[in-house]
Image (tube, rainbow, N blue to C red):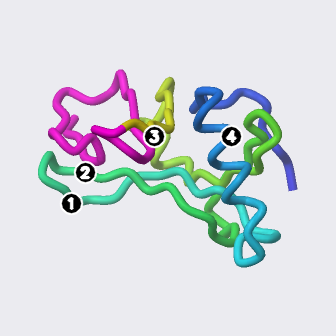
Amino acid sequence: MEILNKTPVTFTRTALDEIKRLMDHKENSGKYLRIGVKGGGCSGMSYLLGFEEKTDKDDLYDIEGISCAINPTHLIYLNHMVINWESGLNARGFSFNNPNASKTCGCGSSFGV
């Protein structure tokens, strides 16, 4: 199993801290952080971010000590994306700064290309 060095996605410090906190939960033990996209959402596509098993279609990345699984067909939508964690009063959750998106929605979890 080859782990790729060039990472298509980066995390802010707050996102890294939150992901590592979530990784400590027993139900996430031994799983990979899945980063991907799926059809749907108010702008056409939605982001996937969660802990899952690796599939045969996935490429593996070590991003700042986090084992990530990404389907390579999703890279066209994910390259150079920055994932942030916000914990303020007006916004709480992961946000995605995606230079590949031609439009995004107000909720920040879907985009169009």
Amino acid residing under circle 2 = Met
Expressed as whole percent of the image width and height from the top left, the position of residue 5 reads 79, 31
What residue appears at the point 76 percent right and 50 percent down from the top-left corner?
A: 67
As helix, strand or loop, the secondary structure at mark 3 comes to strand
- Label 3 is placed on what type of residue? Ser
Between the C-alphas of marks 2 and 1, the distance is: 5 Å
Residue indicated by mark 3: 87
Q: Residue at x 30, y 47 (%)?
A: 109
Residue 77: where, in percent of width, then height? 39, 37
The quadrant where residue 64 appears:
top right
Q: CA distance from mark 3 to mark 4?
A: 12 Å
Which region of the structure is painted magenta? 89-113
* Magenta span contains residue 95: yes
Mark closer to the chain start, 3 or 4: 4
Label 3 packing within 10 angstroms: few (<14), some (14-19), many (20+): few
Q: Earlier in the sequence, mark 2 or mark 4?
A: 4
The residue tagged 2 is: 45
